[in-house]
Image (spheres, rainbow, N blue to C red):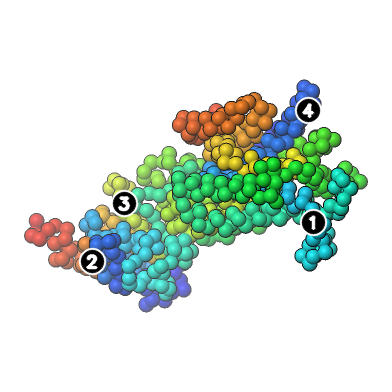
Amino acid sequence: MISNSSHSEPLLVLQKVYKQFGGLQAINNVGFAVQPGSIKAVIGPNGAGKTTLFNLIAGNMPATSGTIIFQGQEIRGKKPYEIARMGMARTFQNIKLFPGMTALECVMVGRHTQSRAGFWAGLFSLPWTWQEERAIRHRSMELLEMLAIADLADVEVSGLAFGQQRAVEMARALAAEPSLLLLDEPAAGLNIYETAEVARLITTIRDMGITVLLVEHDMSLVMDVSDEIVVLSFGSKVAEDTPPKIQKNADVIKIYLGEDGTA
Amino acid sequence: MKTRKLLSLAALALLTAGLHLFTVFSGTQFYLVQLTMAAYYGLVVIGLGVMMGYAGQISIGHAGFFAIGGYLSAALTTNDLTPFVATGGIRILDNLGLLVHGQDIFGADLVTVSPWAACLFAVTVAALIALVIGGPVLKLRGHYLAMATLGFGTIVYRVFLASPYFGEADGISEVPAFQLLPATALFGPLVISGDSAYRVLNYYLAWGVLFVGMALLLNLIDSRAGRALRSLHSSEEAAEAFGVDTARCKVQIFVLSAIYAAVAGSLLTHFNGGIGPNEASVMKSVRYVALVAVGGMTSLWGTLLMGVGLTFLSLRGVFGAFDDVVFGVILIVIMLFAPEGILRGVFGRVVQLFLPGRQV
């Protein structure tokens, strides 16, 4: 949880981050900060580099240069599991659950960083692990209930509907008790009712004390929930402001509606 | 889930006793020899099964670990150390009580390593080798991992085949019995030996080892580490995003399955009284993979039953000269038509009728 960080200290800071793929400058001098307890959104047209930026933050690929500071520590070059253990969790744009596992088991994997029974303890089922195991199961079940999918706990995840899989992913991410939650297009492929549900959920998550950074296409969602928005275009930051100001920003309008943006 | 695990283990215990009774009543006690051997091979297969089916990592080199366990046990418990007894290192071993003094068939002094020490050493070596090669090899995926482990198996095979210390093409024979526990007031001695006086005992010892091996793996699958293994099988990226050190997990399961293979190799070698290079051959590794596949990748019970069952038939000579052909064909057919294994469909559904809940 974020309670220990002071208000002035940002939870996540990006400074002069670059990412190059061969000759392509995918991320070009991007910098911004995420304040604890806030909801920040990254928007931009397709190919603007939003998902690349997420992958840099979560450690899935290394930034070419720049600094990424999470909870006061440089995380550029750290492995994804190390960053996860520091308290960052994420969802994936193209859902990445664990086929072959039930919804409950998937969420239980989310508790990995919150528990400690190792390989040999598990093999011999040492008595002290039993209580931990019960706690993992209990908390995971609570999260499934919170997301209203408790009835699906024992269903194998590849048999779930798309929206339900999204919910399981969200529960798994929350199971990690992150201080920062990265949501990669949480409303992609959802209808307007489900999207409204996601918007409510994101604010609930923020109210739980979890800072949220999201990438999203759906403008209504972004404008509804975010405290601040960063706009990317062709890998560069074009604007960073509150939703009402972003809506009036001439550069942003140009990017989304074209040069003659009066239409 | 706990009850389910206990019930299925109880079923295994009943099966063990049932098979024994069957051989008694049908006057086919000689089957116990092959059933004993099949149980040890079954141990290799379930160890590999967890690695392949749950963690998604293939190994076509597990006969190598089996052979390391068997050959080191055999060599240490048979090769004479008499000329070296006076030298420093060997004397320390002697003082620690790790050596056995006896006489060979010609009455000359024979000093060898005790079976317990040899077995522990053999299994430790196998585990260390798995640990060392596991790091780099398990970075590979799919066919590349298959090729690398195949290469490992081939190297082990050629080393045993070429070393005079390991008996070259003849292998090692005259491996002594392995006394696990001396005789006590209640029981006679617990001895792993092919001697027909110990036939029933050895049947129960082998199936007991298989039972314990199975119980541990069932523990693992339902533990935090087991979920981590299963998660990296389907998405390493997502597993890492939740704090799973996938590289480390893969090495751990690789080492564990190597330990299973080496224990089986060591014990079976004492039971058979010897081991030959055939045990290290690539066809053996392919056979283990085939048995895991036919049992159903993610069904440990299916793997156990098919592993023990088909191995038993093979040992009885049912497949005749086409033994290796049969296992090759099984592998191809299963991969083409029933990648989930043949038991999963039929057996799994039957079990589901009686024990509703998670799939087998």
> Which of the 4 image quadrants contains residue A60?
bottom left
Q: Specify which label sits upstream in the sequence, 1 or 4.
A: 4
Give a yes or no on whether discs 1 and 4 share a subunit.
Answer: yes
The answer for how far apart the CA atoms under marks 3 and 2 are is 24 Å
In percent of width and height, residue A11 lies at 39, 71
Q: Quadrant of residue B287?
A: top right
Q: Secondary structure at mark 2?
A: strand
The answer to whether mark 3 and mark 2 are in CB contact below 8 A is no
Q: Is residue A263 visible?
A: yes
Which of the labelled discs sits on residue A187, or is there none?
3
Q: CA distance from mark 4 to mark 3?
A: 66 Å
> Mark 1 falls on what kind of element?
loop
Q: Secondary structure at mark 4?
A: loop
Q: What's the CA distance linking mark 1 and mark 3?
A: 73 Å
Residue sitting at x 50%, y 42%:
A154
Q: CA distance from mark 1 to mark 2?
A: 74 Å
Q: Quadrant of residue A161?
A: top left
Residue type, label 2 = Ser
Q: Are the residues flagged by discs 1 and 2 in contact, CB closer than 8 Å?
A: no
